[in-house]
């Protein structure tokens, strides 16, 4: 049972990670910095609960805020440049964050041991859940409650005018400008929202694994983050969830018997899907067809 | 309504628009014509702010807008359509209008929440009316990319109108249309003018522009070579020269 | 004494930076022709070097031959990447080829890890020796790397500016539609670009291996990122920009290492990118990069 609960925790955190990239992707921007924002969230939340004794919920909110503010600050210079340059800038930013934590020491004595982040050793002993008597089930439910909250918010936003505006920017920036949309404001907002969600994901991740280090937040994680919404299709948040369940549930856990070879599958799968369905598995046409099938109307 | 003074745009050594002076009075359909490459589309891009001005000034209803960013100009009341249609293809027809209607809401300072979350009933009725006006009422949930060509043109016009502009720039709205569709377009542009919106119409289709424009300016090599009523323009020797010299 | 050390690290950085320039040129050429970034490029370059190293170890042969084999292997990988990640994917969808090459990047990195068990492999010495110039030490292997990189650049520029194929390639990058109208086959030129840049990358990968003394999967990510930084700082699509930016990044890396140590140096190299994004977003030669 614990195995499945653990898997549910992983899927929950990765869903948040994917959703953080989803918001940004809606505006047509590709951010490979999501692992960096996640790292910021993870270290902030863990330091607050372990070193400062904050309650988890407050620490998570702080983690989301700090990651969001960072995303906003990165957004301004990075969004001055277009598409492909942004990819480069965000890759670089993600690595800056990772290398920062590689060099980051801040330890205090707690009884006989020292706690806190220690460079390449990482940050051990994030024991909020065991110390407060949370079972694996509690943790899984807590993570999924937050996932559900974020998904509901994004789903709602998607159907509101804000969602239409984000997508309009993603479709055609010149036409969007000519419709009175402030491109910078929209893109930086999306980036900020993505940062907040990634920060939450990081905060949750730090607490359920109890040990974080910079290698948890490499470019591979950033790639996972954008791969989920792109593979799932950008038409709705459910595509992202489906892709996370497929990759984390099926490819990573289900094919464990393949051993290390399954790592090869992830890259190959991305290449394959992009060849067969360049707009993702659930693209706009499929979604429109599904919608007609179920007789729902929009607007 | 719109006043251009000494407006110039140079690309390197090329003077795409050269010291252009125009005055468009409110409630007119103002035609802007000229051979290919005479600077018409550049003028539109300068007025909407997509291109920075090299020299000169642009005033809208007496207010200086020369250096305002594009999106701000729209909320001061300039809307446009594009020569090569630029709809949000993966958005539905309804969403296309919803996005554009935001500019009007912004202008009226509708409360942040109602504007963004779309609970506002006014927006709904306005969009429904715009859909009916352009004959797209039954296509509201269709993706814009799936519309037929003529429908896309109508949607683009409706999208520009959804912002409730004071000045509407139409960049070759009749391009690629058949005579029947052009007839319908003719009526629609007149209706727009009669509702009090000033129209700047850029068009290749002479029959259409001569029929509906109140006043016409002719550009050649970025300079204005003539301005007057349709009758005056038709009899102007310089205009004949420009067209016959290059296009015939 | 301090000053000599600083000059020493600048010289070393300048010499080694030539390899970054090669990688930057590879990224920038593909961008110029297709307006796409091939994210798998760094991985394929290291892969080419690996393939050559294995072959040399397997069948024996002089160390310098590995450089040429790496170039050939890199060219083949380039063609493979074109076929798998670009040929059948609509180029109008900007996300699709970005994702497919990111997928390829992960795949290539994993294949390298798998075939070598993740262990670093020693690279044979091609040129050794140190020459003393005043108080400076000039490392023979770095001079060799620098000279080879310059030769590769000259060959590339000759191909681009003096051969029919090169002129066709430049025509495609400047006016794709007009180029097609005069009978240039777009997919041939695209494939050719990948072969040429791939060969350049494989060669650069082998040079890096010979200068560092080993190949490791850990080279892939930093090399990719530095190549991308070089491309952006040089201005997307600009070959002279990539050359200068490559040398600049090489120097910056060594100087930061001198002042801040090896674990922190890359942070500052990447911050350099942000400095450029804020003050000169179009790169060193910023006039041409404004269109996209």
Image: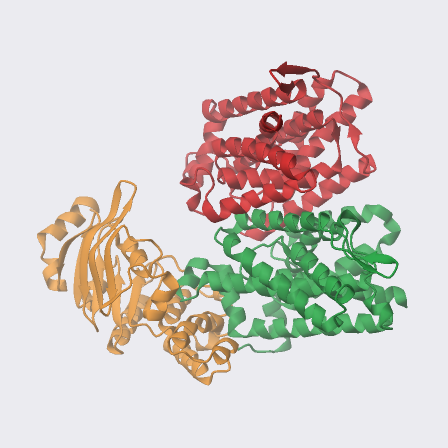
Q: Is residue C25 above or below residue A86?
A: above
Residue drawn at x 40%, y 72% as measured from the top left: B103
Closest to the observer, C132 or B59: C132
Q: How many marks?
A: 0
Residue drawn at x 41%, y 62% as measured from the top left: A177
What letter labels the chain drawn in orange?
A: B
Colouring rule applied to residues: by chain
Q: Classify residue B167 as left or right of residue B216.
A: right
Q: Is residue B102 above or below residue C70?
A: below
Would you identify the image quadrant in which residue A64 lies?
Answer: bottom right
Residue drawn at x 62%, y 71% as measured from the top left: A154
Residue drawn at x 67%, y 53% as measured from the top left: A222
Q: Quadrant of the N terminus of chain B?
A: bottom left
Where residue A20 appears, as percent x and y from the top left, is 64, 62
Where residue B205 appears, as percent x and y from the top left, is 25, 59
Q: Classify residue B117 as left or right of residue C41.
A: left
Would you identify the image quadrant in which residue B60 lies?
Answer: bottom left
Residue A263 visible to an observer of this rendering: yes
Q: Is residue B133 above or below residue C15?
A: below
Closest to the observer, C76 or B223: B223
Q: Is residue A180 above or below residue C267?
A: below
Q: Classify residue A66 as left or right of residue C47.
A: left
Q: In the rendering, what colour is chain A?
A: green
What letter labels the chain drawn in red?
A: C
């Amino acid at each position: 049972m614990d195995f499945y609960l653990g898997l549910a925790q992983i899927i929950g955190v990765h869903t948040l990670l994917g959703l953080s990239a989803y918001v940004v992707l809606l505006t047509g921007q590709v951010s490979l910095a999501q692992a960096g924002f996640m790292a910021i969230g993870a270290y902030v939340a863990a330091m607050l609960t372990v070193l400062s004794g904050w309650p988890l919920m407050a620490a998570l909110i702080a983690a989301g805020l700090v990651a969001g503010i960072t995303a906003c600050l990165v957004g301004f210079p990075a969004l001055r440049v277009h598409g492909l340059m942004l990819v480069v800038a965000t890759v670089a930013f993600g690595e800056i964050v990772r290398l920062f934590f590689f060099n980051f020491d801040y330890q205090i004595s707690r009884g006989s041991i020292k706690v806190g982040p220690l460079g390449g050793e990482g940050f051990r002993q994030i024991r909020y859940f065991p110390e407060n008597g949370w079972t694996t089930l509690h943790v899984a439910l807590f993570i999924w409650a937050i996932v559900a909250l974020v998904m509901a918010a994004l789903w709602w936003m998607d159907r509101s005018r804000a969602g239409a505006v984000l997508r309009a920017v993603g479709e055609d920036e010149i036409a969007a400008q000519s419709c009175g949309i402030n491109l910078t404001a929209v893109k930086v907002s999306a980036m900020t929202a993505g940062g907040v969600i990634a920060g939450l994901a990081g905060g949750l991740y730090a607490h359920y694994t109890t040990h974080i280090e910079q290698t948890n937040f490499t470019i591979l994680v950033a790639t996972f983050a954008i791969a989920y919404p792109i593979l799932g299709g950008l038409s709705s948040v459910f595509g992202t969830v489906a892709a996370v369940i497929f990759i984390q549930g099926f490819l990573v856990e289900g094919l464990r018997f393949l051993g290390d070879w399954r790592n090869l599958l992830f890259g190959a799968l991305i290449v394959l899907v992009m060849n067969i369905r360049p707009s993702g598995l659930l693209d706009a046409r499929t979604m429109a067809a599904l919608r007609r099938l179920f007789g729902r109307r929009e607007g | 309504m719109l006043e251009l003074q000494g407006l110039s745009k140079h690309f390197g050594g090329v003077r795409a628009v050269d010291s252009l002076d125009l005055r468009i009075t409110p409630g007119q359909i103002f035609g802007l014509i000229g051979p290919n490459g005479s600077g018409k589309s550049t003028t539109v891009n300068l007025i909407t702010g997509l291109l920075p001005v090299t020299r000169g000034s642009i005033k809208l209803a007496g207010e200086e807008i020369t250096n305002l960013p594009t999106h701000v100009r729209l909320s001061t009341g300039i809307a446009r359509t594009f020569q090569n249609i630029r709809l949000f293809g993966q958005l539905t027809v309804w969403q296309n209008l919803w996005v554009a209607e935001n500019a009007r809401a912004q202008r009226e300072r509708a409360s942040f929440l109602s504007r963004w979350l779309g609970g506002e009933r006014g927006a709904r009725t306005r969009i429904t009316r715009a859909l009916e006006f352009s004959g797209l009422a039954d296509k509201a949930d269709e993706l814009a990319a799936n519309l037929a060509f003529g429908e896309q043109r109508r949607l683009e016009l409706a999208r520009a109108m959804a912002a409730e502009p004071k000045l509407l720039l139409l960049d070759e709205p009749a391009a690629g249309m058949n005579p029947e569709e052009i007839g319908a377009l003719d009526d629609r542009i007149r209706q727009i003018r009669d509702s009090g919106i000033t129209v700047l119409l850029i068009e290749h289709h002479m029959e259409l522009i001569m029929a509906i424009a109140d006043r016409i300016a002719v550009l050649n090599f970025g300079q204005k070579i003539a301005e007057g009523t349709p009758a005056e323009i038709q009899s102007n020797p310089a205009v004949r020269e420009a067209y016959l010299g290059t296009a015939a | 004494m301090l000053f000599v050390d600083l000059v020493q690290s600048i010289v070393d950085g300048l010499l080694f930076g030539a390899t970054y320039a090669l990688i930057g040129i590879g990224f920038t050429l593909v961008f110029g022709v297709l307006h796409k970034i091939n994210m798998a490029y760094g991985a394929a370059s290291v892969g080419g070097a690996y393939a050559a190293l294995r072959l040399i170890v397997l069948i024996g042969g002089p160390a310098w031959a590995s450089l040429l084999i790496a170039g050939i292997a890199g060219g083949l990988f380039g063609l493979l990447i074109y076929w798998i990640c670009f040929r059948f994917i609509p180029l109008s969808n900007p996300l699709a080829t970005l994702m497919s090459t990111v997928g390829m990047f992960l795949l290539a990195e994993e294949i390298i890890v798998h075939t070598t068990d993740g262990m670093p492999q020693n690279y044979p010495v091609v040129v050794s020796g140190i020459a003393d110039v005043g108080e400076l030490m000039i490392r023979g292997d770095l001079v060799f790397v620098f000279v080879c990189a310059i030769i590769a650049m000259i060959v590339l520029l000759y191909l681009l500016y003096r051969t029919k194929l090169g002129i066709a390639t430049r025509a495609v990058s400047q006016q794709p539609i007009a180029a097609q109208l005069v009978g240039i086959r777009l997919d041939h030129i695209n494939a050719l670009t990948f072969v040429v840049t791939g060969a350049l990358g494989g060669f650069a990968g082998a040079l890096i291996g010979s200068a560092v003394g080993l190949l490791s999967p850990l080279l892939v990510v930093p090399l990719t990122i530095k190549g991308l930084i070089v491309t952006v700082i040089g201005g997307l699509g600009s070959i002279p920009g990539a050359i200068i930016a490559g040398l600049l990044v090489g120097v910056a890396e060594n100087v930061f290492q001198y002042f801040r140590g090896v674990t922190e140096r890359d942070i500052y190299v990447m911050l350099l990118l942000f400095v450029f994004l804020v003050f000169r977003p179009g790169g060193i030669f910023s006039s041409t990069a404004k269109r996209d």
